[in-house]
Image: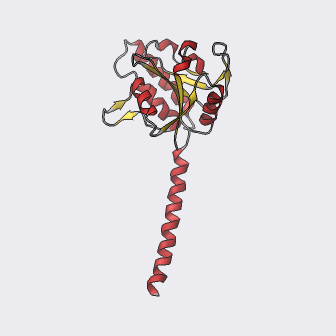
Amino acid sequence: MKLNKHLKPGLTNAIFITLFLSSFTLSFGQTVNSNWQQELSQSLEAFIGCESSGGNNQCYKYLGQSVNTVYKVNDFYSKESGRYMFPNEIADFVSNGGKWEIIGHAYDKDALNKAQDYANSKKATIAVYKAADGQGHVALILPGDLQASGSWGIKVPNSASFFLSDYQKSYIGKGLSYAFTKDMLKDVVVYGRKY
């Protein structure tokens, strides 16, 4: 009897701690940096400075860092390589179905609506293009509002993009159609982070 008396408070405490830690983890699993706009602008300036100075093999890191800057998700840092992933590596990583799930294709207006909803729900969201030659491009979906796109003919999510091939086209706070031309649209897939 005395043993049961001592186990009950211990069991109650264990359950309480488990529930507390679970809610603690969930509250930090899905968040947006309250200062993301300023920090992302600083990252864009640093990226442009890096690329305009002749570029080096480290300029690509700003893309992977941007997801961490906004959503506090550092999935695109490869511990094995000791660096942030290249766009084509990010495309492969999210398509493996582990931590990221397909929301839909960028030509599907329902997928674009869902992508904006994900971002506004503090869930990391990206759009990925990977060409047949293996080269890719990734844009970050940002919290905000859908914007009309004349080139795509539908409303598109708010986004940011760091262009390695043409850094002067890089931006924050424009529609997703600024990141991908209409002829790329059929190959652009939108992914959301699983929480």
Q: Where is residue 93 drawn, in percent x and y?
A: 42, 32
Q: Where is residue 90 drawn, in percent x and y?
A: 42, 29
Query: In the rendered image of this protein, does residue 169 appear above or below residue 95?
Result: above
The colour mode here is secondary structure
Query: In the rendered image of this protein, does residue 37 appear above or below residue 6?
Result: above
Q: Where is residue 62 drawn, in percent x and y?
A: 44, 26
Compared across the picture, whether 23 is left or right of 150 comes to left
Q: Nearer the viewer, residue 163 or 45?
A: 163
Q: Which residue is drawn at 42% across and 12% down?
A: 52
Compared across the picture, whether 186 is left or right of 10 comes to right
Count all numbered tags in the image, as a single digit. 0
Q: Which residue is drawn at 59% across and 21% down?
A: 176
Compared across the picture, whether 173 is left or right of 165 comes to right
Query: In the rendered image of this protein, does residue 70 appear above or below residue 177?
Result: below
Q: Which of 42 and 186 is in front in this view?
A: 186
Residue 119, quarter of picture: top right
Query: In the rendered image of this protein, does residue 109 appear above or below residue 153?
Result: below
Q: From this viewpoint, which residue is outermost toward the bottom?
A: 1
Q: Which residue is drawn at 49% across and 37% down?
A: 100
Q: Where is residue 126 drawn, in percent x and y?
A: 52, 29
